[in-house]
């Protein structure tokens, strides 16, 4: 399975290539991951200035805390974010509405 840094790099590349796939959503997501691979990462959706990077975001609109393996599964489309939240595998702080939209954003940038 891919390394977290590699996944974030792929999302960053995809955002740079076609920021329109975020459907006009403007938000800052932070991911605090634990488990096999730990770390903080963030995705900033701001039109042409969208990017993904390692480290915490200055002012995240939505922070998601989860196991790194679950994050990988969610990015790959093998774990539904709503189900992960309902089962306690995903903790959300901040704007819940943005968390619900994240699944669609990740799907738009999923690499096959």
Image (tube, rainbow, N blue to C red):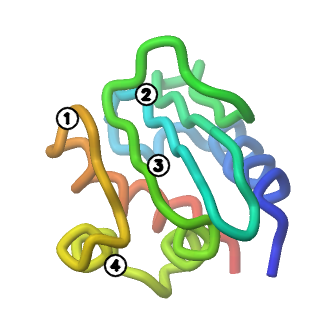
Q: Secondary structure at mark 4?
A: loop
Residue nearer the viewer, 28 or 90: 90
Q: Answer with mark 3 or mark 4, whichever residue precedes in sequence.
A: 3
Horizontal placement of 21 versus 100: left or right? right
Please give left or right for residue 101 compared with residue 9 in the image. Answer: left
Residue in view at x 63 percent, y 41 percent: 15
- Foreground of the two, 37 or 61: 37
- Which SS class for mark 3? helix
Instruction: Decide: few, some or many residues near mark 4? Use Cα within 10 Å; few <14, some 14-19, many ≥20.
Output: few
| Mark 3 Cα-neighbour bin, 10 Å: few <14, some 14–19, many ≥20 | some
Picture coordinates of residue 7, whole percent (x, y): 74, 59
Q: Residues within 10 Å of mark 2 (few under 14, many from 20)?
A: many
- Compared to residue 37, the image places residue 23 above or below, namely above
Q: Secondary structure at mark 2?
A: strand
Residue that badge 3 annotates = 21
**With 102 as the anchor, is 32 left or right in this view?**
right
What separation in Å lies between label 4 and label 2 (alpha carbons)?
A: 20 Å
Q: Which mark is residue 28?
A: 2
Q: How far apart are the alpha carbons under marks 1 and 3?
A: 21 Å
- In space, the residues marked 1 and 4 are separated at their CA atoms by 18 Å
The residue wearing badge 4 is 80
Point out the residue furthest to the top here. Answer: 58
Counting from the top left corner in percent of width and height, residue 34 is at 61, 58
Which residue in the protein does label 1 denote?
95
Q: Which tag, 1 or 4, sits closer to the chain's start?
A: 4
Give coordinates of residue 17: x percent, y percent. Answer: 71, 42
């Amino acid at each position: 399975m891919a390394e977290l840094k590699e996944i974030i790099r792929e999302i960053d590349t995809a955002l740079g290539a076609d920021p329109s796939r975020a459907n006009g959503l403007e938000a800052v997501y932070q991911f605090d991951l634990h488990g096999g691979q730990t770390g903080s990462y963030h995705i900033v959706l701001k039109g042409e200035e969208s990017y993904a990077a390692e480290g915490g975001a200055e002012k995240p609109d939505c922070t998601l805390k989860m196991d790194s393996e679950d994050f990988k599964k969610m990015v790959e489309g093998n774990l539904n974010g709503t189900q992960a939240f309902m089962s306690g595998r995903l903790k959300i702080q901040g704007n819940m509405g943005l968390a619900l939209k994240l699944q669609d954003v990740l799907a738009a940038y999923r690499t096959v």
